[in-house]
Image (cartoon, rainbow, N blue to C red):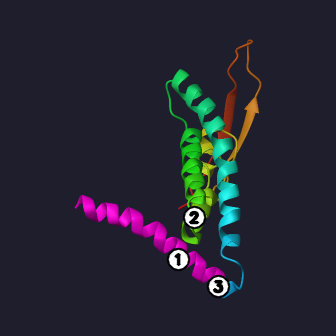
């Protein structure tokens, strides 16, 4: 069983490189031209996300909660590794990971924070000023269940 896993780990990148070279041949471009953009984008994304992930992870540990932004940075780091791997198929999987919506900008996350309606309900939220100098804001709103 371990030999099978090792064989798969070596075979997939080789098949990915072969598929990329065949795809480049079909397009009529040099094979190396298919590898350079992915490596450059992966390298830049890796540099940016390692810095971002460090600060987000430290903030999550200090707040004793792991936020969706930490998971988003981790997903982008996996995409950067896939972009660094030579091959067109791994680049497509990396782009799929990059195009997934962020947890911090999803309608459910924004609605729980209190402010954005997603269009499927007719909810309106308004903020009223706090009374008596309290620091917390009062959120008042109406909702209608649509079935």
Rendering coords of residue 89 (x, y %): 55, 70
Q: Which residues are magenta?
A: 1-24
Q: Are marks 2 and 3 in contact (CB under 8 Å)?
A: no
Rendering coords of residue 137 (x, y %): 70, 25
Mark 3 and mark 1: Cα distance apart in space: 11 Å
Residue 25's tag is 3
In the displayed structure, would residue 22 be above or below residue 135? below
Residue 18's tag is 1
Which residue appears at 70% of the width and 14% of the height? 134
Q: Secondary structure at mark 1?
A: helix
Q: Which of disc 1 and disc 2 is earlier in sequence?
A: 1
Q: Which of disc 1 and disc 3 is earlier in sequence?
A: 1
In the displayed structure, would residue 126 be above or below residue 122? above
Residue beneath label 2, please?
86
Check if residue 14 falls in the magenta segment.
Answer: yes
Which residue appears at 66% of the width and 75% of the height? 31
Mark 2 and mark 1: Cα distance apart in space: 10 Å
Rendering coords of residue 59 (x, y %): 59, 26
- Is residue 119 visible from the viewing direction of this image? no
Rendering coords of residue 144 (x, y %): 60, 52
């Amino acid at each position: 069983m371990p030999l099978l896993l090792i064989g798969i780990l070596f075979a997939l990148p080789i098949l990915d490189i072969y598929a990329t070279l065949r795809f480049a041949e079909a397009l009529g471009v040099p094979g190396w031209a298919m590898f350079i953009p992915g490596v450059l984008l992966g390298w830049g994304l890796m540099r940016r996300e390692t810095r971002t992930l460090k600060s987000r992870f430290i903030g999550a540990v200090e707040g004793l909660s792991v936020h969706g932004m930490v998971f988003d940075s981790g997903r982008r780091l996996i995409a950067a590794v896939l972009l660094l791997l030579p091959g067109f198929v791994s680049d497509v999987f990396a782009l799929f990971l990059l195009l997934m919506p962020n947890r911090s900008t999803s309608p459910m996350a924004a609605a729980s924070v209190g402010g954005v309606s997603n269009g499927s309900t007719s909810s309106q939220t308004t903020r009223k000023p706090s009374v008596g100098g309290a620091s917390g804001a009062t959120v008042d709103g109406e909702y209608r269940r649509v079935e």
